[in-house]
Image: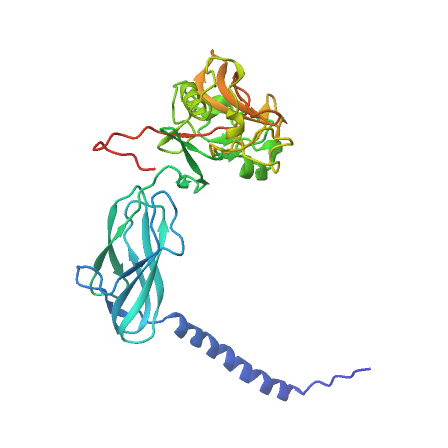
Amino acid sequence: MLIFSLPDRKNIRLLLFPAMIALLVVPLVLRSQVNQRVAAYNLGAGAECPGMLITGSCQASRPLTTAEKVLFQADVSASGSYTIRTNTVNGYYFDATGYFSTKGIQLAVLQGHGIPLAGQTDTFTVTGSGNISSCTFTINVAPWQCGMPFTDRRDSQSYRTVPIGDQCWMAQNLNFGTQINYMWNQKNNGISEKYCYLGNKSNCDIYGGLYQWDELMNYTTTEGTRGLCPEGWHIPTDPEWCAATRTIDPEIDCQVIGASGNDGGGAMKATGTTYWSPPNDGATNLSEFSAMPGGHRDYPGSFSSRAYVGFFWSSSECGPAHAWTRSMHYFDDKVNRDDYIKSNGFSVRCIRDAQPAAGEPTVDP
C-alpha cells in the first residue's frame, strides 16, 4: 500500500507562490516574441531590382509550382520581420515572408502563385513592409500550345490536350461542376451540375462527369456553344467530330448512323484493360485521344456500361429531343455515330475555339 503525506498549509502556500510568479512572467515573454520589430530595407529605386535571379519556367495555362520563384537582394538597415509582395499581373504574383536577422545585403525568395495567361512579357512591381522604395522585374511567359496541359481556372482541374488535324481537343473527359444525387435530373438553376457513375466521386476523377445534354449546353441549342466547357473551348459540333474522326480514319462515313470506318475507334481508345473491359479490341490510341469508357446514366437514375462503352455528346441536335453523339466500344475498333435522347447522361470532350489569324487579337487559354 502506498501512503502519501501532504505538506502543511504553510508549505503549500510556499509551493504555490513561485508557480504564480511563473504564470505572470510567461505571457510577457511570449508577447515580446510576437511583437517582433519590422525590418527596414531598401528594394531599389524604381528601376530593376538589384541582384535579381528568376528560377523555373512560367508557362501559360499552367499553375506556378514551388520551382517558379524570384530571388533578389534587399539592403537591410534594421533587422526584423518582413513581408514582400508583387502586384498581380495576368493571373499570377510572387510573395515572401521571413525575418532578416542581420543588416546589409540579404537574399529574399519570392514564391510564385497563380496561373499565367497566354505568352507575354509581364512587368511586376515589388513592395514590402518597412521598405523605403520599390523596384521592378519582368517575367517571360512561354506561350501555351496544343499538346501542353491546360488548367481550367474555374476549379484548377488540369487536362491533357492533343492536336488532331488543325483542331485541338482535350485528351480527358470534362470533369467540371457540382456532383448531384444521381436520382435527380439536372436543372437550370444557375449551378453547373454533373453525375458521377454510381454516385462515386472517384469515378468522376477517373472518367469525368456525366451530363444531360441541356445541362451541358447551359440551356441553349446553339451549335458550337461553350456550354460547361472552360473559356476558350466549346462543345464539338457533329461536323467537328466528323473532321476529327476522318483525320484519324479517312474511311469513316459521317453520314452513316452506327459504326463505320476501319480502325478509327481503336486509334482513339485508351489502351489496355485497366479501364476498358477485355478484350478492348483494336485499341492502339495512335491518335492520343485516349477515349475512356465512362458508361452512361439513364433516365430516371440508373447507370450502365462503364468499362464497356464511352459515349460523347456533340452540340448538334437531331430533332427537338435528340442530339448526335460519338461512341467507342470494348468489342471492336470502330467509331459509332448515333442520336440519343437528351436526358441521357454522357461524357463530353471539349474542343478549342478556332484561333485568329496572325495579327488578330488572341484569346487566352
Residue 32: where, in percent of width, then height?
39, 74
Q: Would residue 192 be found to the left or right of residue 166 on screen?
A: right
Q: Identify the residue shown where x is 32% and y is 28%.
A: 354
Q: Would residue 131 be found to the left or right of residue 205 on screen?
A: left
Image quarter (top left, top right, bottom left or bottom right) of the C terminus: top left
Q: How is the image coloured?
A: rainbow
Image quarter (top left, top right, bottom left or bottom right) of the N terminus: bottom right
Residue 244: where, in percent of width, then height?
42, 25
Q: Depth check: 6 or 132 in front?
A: 132
Q: Depth check: 226 or 192 in front?
A: 226
Count how many numbered circles sit on residues in the image.
0
Q: Depth check: 198 or 324 in front?
A: 324
**Which residue extends farthest right?**
1
Q: In which image quadrant can residue 129 be found?
A: bottom left
Q: Is residue 57 above or below residue 332?
A: below
Q: Identify the residue shown where x is 42% and y is 35%.
A: 162
Q: In which image quadrant can residue 145 be found?
A: top left
Q: Would residue 213 be found to the left or right of residue 136 on screen?
A: right
Q: Depth check: 363 or 97 in front?
A: 363
Q: Is residue 138 above or below residue 209?
A: below
Residue 128: where, in percent of width, then height?
27, 61
Residue 94: where, in percent of width, then height?
32, 55
Q: Is residue 208 above or below residue 80?
A: above
Q: Is residue 125 above or below residue 20?
A: above
